[in-house]
Amino acid sequence: MTINRAANEIIVRMQGVSKSFPGVKALDGVDFDLRAGEVMALLGENGAGKSTLMKILSGVYQRDEGQVTVFGKEVEVGLTPRKAQELGITIIHQELNMCQHLTVAENIFLGRELRMKDGRLDNKSMNQAAAQVLERLRIDIRPTDVVGNLQLSKRQMVEIARALSTDARVLIMDEPTSALTAREIQDLFQIIRQLRDEGRGIIYISHRLEELQHIVDRVTVLRDGKHIRTMEWQDTSLPEIISLMVGRDIKEKFPRVESVRGKPIFEVHGLNAGRLVRDVSLTLYEGEILGIAGLVGAGRTETTRAIVGVDPKDSGRLVLDGREIRINKPMDAIRQGVVLVPEDRKRDGLCVKLSVTSNVELPNLDIVSTPAGVVRVRQVADMVKKAISNLSIRLPGPHVDAASLSGGNQQKVVVGKWLARNSRVVIFDEPTRGIDVAAKVEIYHLMNQLKQQGIGVMFISSEMPEVLGIADRIVVMCDGRVTGELMREEATQEKILEYATRFDYKLDTAAS
């Protein structure tokens, strides 16, 4: 469908918008506008107010002050998500918000189901319409697939498909590529360009600044709840944008600390677990950060899940500090000092309805309780205070719900609760997904600190510059196997990709 809008027509205008939550002012007199047929990048650190501003525009939050105009008409206070959708505004949230037990088609049409004359759901029509949207996005999944059975990247694409199915004229994308493969990102960018050419306005929130050059027309930067600057993309640069976001220059994107490699801390021998973990062996040493690279589906996450007992092992041995250990469930790993910071923080890493204090406290009850089971309140408070301070977690206070924090600060809480245990091995699975530039550097500094303390650090990342910049040694996986190992000095993107594409030759040859 073509949207007939004059070029450069302002279709969204927000003036003097303010919003406060208990103990914090999230937005302070922010101005923002969006034109027809443009992609506007909305940038800032975690907690800068980006998501809050967009939730006001989409009806999730109500503004305290300010004026909002959409397609030339002022929008009264009391905007709801349904009313926003009727105005042509759709938001794709950073944290996926779907019903895991429903099919892809049922999620796409949730709340606006197609029905037959007798009132029954018209599943056939919904499946057909969903198939058309999925085909447009070139997503290789079926409308009848259950969402809960899909990989995170596929669930992300379903969220995007749902938004596009509403024929939105204003599309808000909050970190849409955080869980996508390179091919899926390319497909998404093609869709974004198509929507822009149709005259739709797209607001694009992302911490992956390097991808902006491919699609962005203008940039708006927020910092500490205030509007800092709006500028044309061609008139700025990434260093300038980063400086505006953080209010200072970040001299080192990937800070590195040199240290001498010591004795082996943790060893994995012949680990097998399901289809995607096949005879995996690796060693983690003192004084190093071990990166695990590979393409989506290589078995990296599955390997870490098997190590810490989330998924069952078929065979294999684990050795910690020269002693063989048994890990059959996550609690076994935690007590042994082997902990995992998972990729999906909302589903696997946090109890979002509980406070930050409770989230840090829960996995550490064994070390903050008396033999009689009484929790030492002062010790818990000190533990939480230390986690907040060490990771620079931005929050009004330790008793706020984890759900109220920005995505990046939620990730910091996940990291903080495990570091409170003085763990021996810390495994990070995509630790910087959805985190801003400055917060990424803080996580890198944290990993370096652990390395210097003699703690084993292992991390998975889909961002090759990150792996090359932080890891001292890189293990590459493909198709469930370790296919290569590279020291930092010899590692390049080309070599990593070579190992990451060493698939087994599985084509059956017919017997002659």
Image: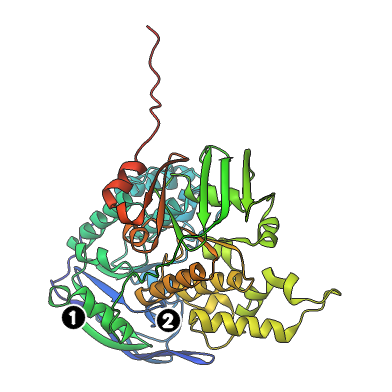
Q: Is 501 above or below relative to 253?
A: above
CA distance for labels 1 and 2 = 21 Å
Quadrant assignment, res 470:
bottom left
Looking at this view, name the residue that lies furthest to the top: 512
Query: Residue at coordinates 37% horizontally, 66% vertically from top-left?
Result: 175
Q: Is residue 260 above or below residue 255?
A: above
Amino acid type, label 2:
Gly
Question: Which amino acid, by three-letter code, is at mark 1?
Answer: Met
Mark 2: few/some/many CA within 10 Å (<14, 14-19, 20+): many
Tag shown at residue 231: 1
Query: What residue do we see at 34% from left, 86% from top?
Result: 223
- What residue would you read off at disc 2? 47
Q: Nearer the viewer, residue 60 or 455?
A: 455
Q: Is residue 358 above or below residue 276?
A: below
**In front here: 130 or 380?**
380
Q: Circle 1 sits in a helix, a strand or a loop, which is it? A: strand
Tell me residue 425's x, y (percent).
57, 61
Report x, y in % for residue 437.
35, 74
364 left or right of 504 in image: right
